[in-house]
Amino acid sequence: MAEKGSLAVIELVRSIGHRVNSSVQRLGFAARFFVMILVYSGQSFRRLHLTIREIYFSGFQSLLIILVSGLFIGMVLGMQGYETLQRYGSSEALGVLVALSLTRELGPVVSALLFASRAGSSITAEIGLMKATEQLTAMDMMAVNPIARVVAPRFWGGVISMPLLAALFSAIGVFGGYLVGVVLIGVDEGAFWSQMQGSVDFRFDVWNGIVKSFVFGVAVSLIAVFEGYDATPTAEGVSSSIKRTVVYSALAILALDFVLTSFMFRGL
Amino acid sequence: MSRKLLDLWVGFFVVIGIAALLFLALRVGNLSSANFAETYPLIAKFDNIGGLKVRGPVKSAGVVVGRVADIRFDPQTYEALVTLTIDGRYQFPKDTFASILTAGLLGEQYVGLDAGGDDKMLKPGDVFAKTQSAVVLEKLIGQFMFNKAAEGTEPK
């Protein structure tokens, strides 16, 4: 009896140790993978149309979801913000509320979450399936570096698309707030824009939002290409690595957002 | 899809992305108006700055003429050293009065400049001769209560 119990404890300790070991190993591989992408980027930039193709697939094709969700988030912000602000008789500050919350937080964060589930998952699926059907190995055999040919263009495509998508999200969101606030509810148009321009600082609000979305772009793209490249080459393995891309991206975006915000907007 | 068409769509995407950035910079933000091209520093010493923050506005006659660049504590005189960057277009007389005011009842605090009548102007790096500190609500209430108490004892 005691023999059995101690065996179970040993098994438990061993499984915990194995998990910690393998996740640290994966983290190390991810870091090495990131450096490899950077090293082979030069090679892949020489064939720029590969990256442009990926900007088309991950950036341009995400436009619809980004624009529609941005518009609706801006409209909801306009409605909810008006509801709260008019209680304190300061409904003219609606523009400030909409613009600040979009440029500082919602624009970068929500567009990165959408980007991770729209483009990140498809990148993982593509690379994972390439690995499962041994296309990556075939490339290696033909002396074509799969990181330079497949991974780096997808990574840079995501990194370049992300800030542009976040800026579009914020801009269309402000427009949505304008639609609801000024056109529908009837907040004074002059006050809406002038108070917004008075309180939104380009360097501190808009620029920090862009920096945030760039960091999110690097994180999401790296997670997506890494999970694809590291996928177990089976149907089940690819599906679970897609799941991991979405989950890890969301966690990384929210955690990084907290860290970046505490650096950028401390004491303001 | 042919490469030409692909390039066209990607170009379109980049163009509207940059257009959105410009919209954020010029229409939403204040890149066009609030960046002073040339500035010069002035220093004001206050006994108490209240809730004044770096980057807060400096106003004269209600118009923003500069920003608070730096707030420091002077260990010799036990005063707050506030550095203001003033728009180069505006010059102020030597006897300009700098005070810390509050926008609205509970609004942000800013530095107000009341120009005097001196012929000589403040040069970059000069120190304001006269300043007025922020109004601290607790002190005000304390003073009011003290006065009330004093009034109460007078008639006897």
Image: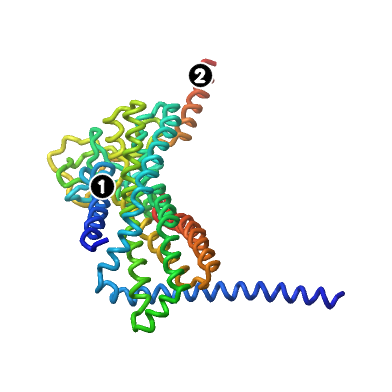
Residue appearing at x 17%, y 50% in the figure: B38
Q: Distance between the residues labelled 2 and 1?
A: 63 Å
Residue appearing at x 25%, y 72% in the figure: A47
Q: In this view, does A183 lie above or below B49?
A: above
Estimate the x, y position of residue A125 in percent, counting from the top left. Answer: 45, 64
Q: Are marks 2 and 1 on the same chain?
A: yes
Q: Nearer the viewer, residue A175 or B136?
A: A175
Chain letter, disc 1 residue: B
Q: How crowded is mark 2: few (under 14 residues within 10 Å), some or many (20 or more)?
A: few
Estimate the x, y position of residue A190 in percent, counting from the top left. Answer: 26, 30
Position of B28 compared to B139: left or right? left
**Residue, disc 1:** B25
Q: Nearer the viewer, residue A92 or A248?
A: A248
Q: Can residue B48 be seen in this view?
A: no
Q: At numbered mark 2, what does the secondary structure look like: helix, strand or loop?
A: loop
Q: At numbered mark 1, what does the secondary structure look like: helix, strand or loop?
A: helix
Q: Image quarter for residue A21?
A: bottom right
Q: In this view, does B51 lie above or below A23?
A: above
Q: Where the C terminus of chain B falls, by quadrant?
A: top right
Q: Image quarter for residue A92?
A: top left
Task: Say if mark 2 contacts mark 1, CB within 8 Å.
Answer: no
**Residue, disc 2:** B154
Q: Which of A241 and A111 is in front in this view?
A: A241
Q: Which of A18 and B47 is in front in this view?
A: A18
Q: Can residue A136 be seen in this view?
A: yes
Position of B20 compared to A72: left or right? left
Residue appearing at x 25%, y 45% in the figure: B23
Q: Is residue A146 above or below residue A171?
A: below
Which residue in the rendered view is the most extreme toward the right?
A1
Estimate the x, y position of residue A58 in percent, counting from the top left. Answer: 35, 59
Q: What residue type is labelled 2?
A: Glu
